[in-house]
Image (cartoon, helix red, strand yellow):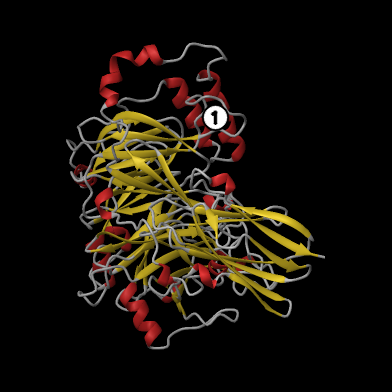
Amino acid sequence: MAQDDNKPLDNLPDPGRRKFLNTAALVGLSGAGLSVGLSACNKKESAPAAGAPSAQGEVKGEVGEFGKYEVPPGQLDDYYSFSSGGHSGEVRIYGIPSGRELKRIPVFNMDALVGWGITNESKAILGTKPNGTPKYTTGDTHHVHQSYVDGVYDGKYMFVNDKLHSRLARVRMDTMECDKILELPNVQGFHGTFTDKRDPVDSKINYTTRVFCGGEFAIPLPNAGTDDASKYRSLFSCVNSDTMEMMWQVLIDGNCDLVATSYDGKLAATNQYNTEMGVHYEDMMAAEMDACLFFNVARIEEAVKAGKVTTIAGSKVPVVDGTRASNKDPKTALTCTVPIPKNPHGVNISPDGKYYACSGKLSPTASVIEHDLVLKWFDGELANPRDAVVAEPEIGLGPLHTGFDNKGNAYTTLFLDSQIVKWNVAEAIKAYKGDKNAKAVVDRIDVHYQPGHGFTSMGETKDSDGKYFISDNKFSKDRFLPVGPLHAETAQLIDISGDKMKLVADHSVYSEPHDSIIVRRDIIKTRQIYNMDEFPLAVKDPKESGVFRNGKKVTVKLTSQAPTYSLREFKLKKGDEVTIILTNHDKVEDLTHGFGIPKYDIQFIVNPQETKSVTFIADKPGVYWCYCTNFCHALHLEMRTRMIVEA
């Protein structure tokens, strides 16, 4: 392994901090070892006692400088940040640089505010059990990525994974609402996902048509109740971004962690941290080298078209063989395995499309893989896949995720060092070739604490602008007012526009975000009201309101227009299966109505010109005041109707 002369000795953390971090690394990042490390750090950097003076005086001289990153009242942010919500199951939207939370998009979770998981429309997207309840009520979102045109976000769709139940969701960017969810067959631990940026063959298709999904947890295939670890495998999946239907899967050795895609559409990549196929954590760290696995998209789709496929466990999705044993000949191979040290976490492509950065996690290195050299291997013009690695600088302890600016610099989160390291790709390549004067590492900055994901403004597009980096940190400890055992987490905003990185804001975020993207605000074009004609069940005229009975099935049609519902009351009989359809007739921006039914566990909202419906059994006789739950008018409290259930 080539070494860069600029080992991480500049601007190091204090010796005591580095000592405990090295100790944590040596015990193999086990839960006990990491806990000991964090405990030791906490003793030194403990939160101030209640009533202790604030730090305001300490930064008094810098208030003016920090003020330029604030967004004054009435002004808008320059960027959106779209963030996963972790095991909340949602997606979140923030303004940058202010850090103001703008919206939470329910996706895989239940949401009482909007009625997600309660309305019939949301249940149809989530999927239901035979009794009509949602199939799953939990989720674990990790990675959000948008659709592209010409290598830049097009503002049409956003995609997010559910690691818990192996689902992919699509969010419409004009309404910021989920419109499709797909469960991947024969996959567990669906972690990394990424959209393609153009077609690998047809140059006219310069936009997203596929979403790639990596299976992290190897399982027996088929997973039918036998436990033979020798038969554990993982699948790499491809989904049609328009129809949200499965296209194909690739059977592989090892596992998939995160995913990256090339700007020419020819390759998808995933880093692999468990090439050993271990089922216990110590077995997953046995090998010194793991891999970054590349998929030749055109060849895979040729194989599918030619029928060189199999299927698994009743699924009709075509599966091709991407295992190492079946892909030794580069000229016919579907996959290329590039060896990378050790337990890598994260693979990201540079905005110019030339390089992939794959961080070592248990190695203090970041490996730089040249895109064209991987293509050369597939053409039989490169003898060894490892020769596609063109740099491997030592950057610090626990390197994870990398973002890029527009000046050839990379920014990598160092989990164990609690730092962001800025390093220059060109200098790293020179050092790898033996240039003793090359200086790969440019700058370091401490973050608070243990950064996981990090990302730059527009950094995963050709239009990376080099303005901001956000470090999503896993521990906040003493950075905010204490709120009990579950702490807020920190998303720290760093100005990267100059030679030196500058920490400019601590943004508190609710647990537990993973990856995010920062998107220029001009790209996002949202709608302010719906079109009533888009809803097949819309009650277009208040005169259509009423109670319509078909035996025990009853449909109640209602409209809302502040401050009234179109029915003053409606009568049902005990045991009726009731469907309530509500259309909001207001056309004023931001004039949303709610509909809550006490004791029936029903609450949902309808935005201007929107229609939603709910179905339930009227099993409790009595009078129930259905009321508007979302403030809409000076007479909001008077906006009610009576549901009368007769015994």
Residue situated in front as seen by the camera: 106 or 460: 106
Asked if 45 appears above or below 199 in the picture, the reply is above
Residue 263: image quadrant is: bottom left
Instruction: List x then y, in percent, for residue 28.
Output: 54, 41
Instruction: List x then y, in percent, for residue 436.
Output: 19, 37
The amino acid sitting under disc 1 is Leu
> Residue at horizontal 75%, vertical 63%?
645
Residue 206: image quadrant is: bottom left
Res 2 seen here: no
- Helix, strand or loop status at disc 1: helix
> Residue at horizontal 37%, vertical 36%?
396
Asked if 505 appears above or below 367 in the picture, the reply is above
Instruction: List x then y, in percent, for residue 41.
Output: 52, 24
Q: Quadrant of the C terminus?
A: bottom right
Asked if 132 appears above or below 630 in the picture, the reply is below
Residue annotated with mark 1? 38
Rate crowding at label 1 as few (under 14), some (14 to 19) or many (20 or more) other CA atoms within 10 Å. some
Res 145 seen here: yes
Q: Is residue 93 left or right of residue 644?
A: left
Q: Is residue 466 left or right of residue 507?
A: left
Q: Is residue 402 left or right of residue 408?
A: right
> Residue at horizontal 59%, vertical 73%?
221
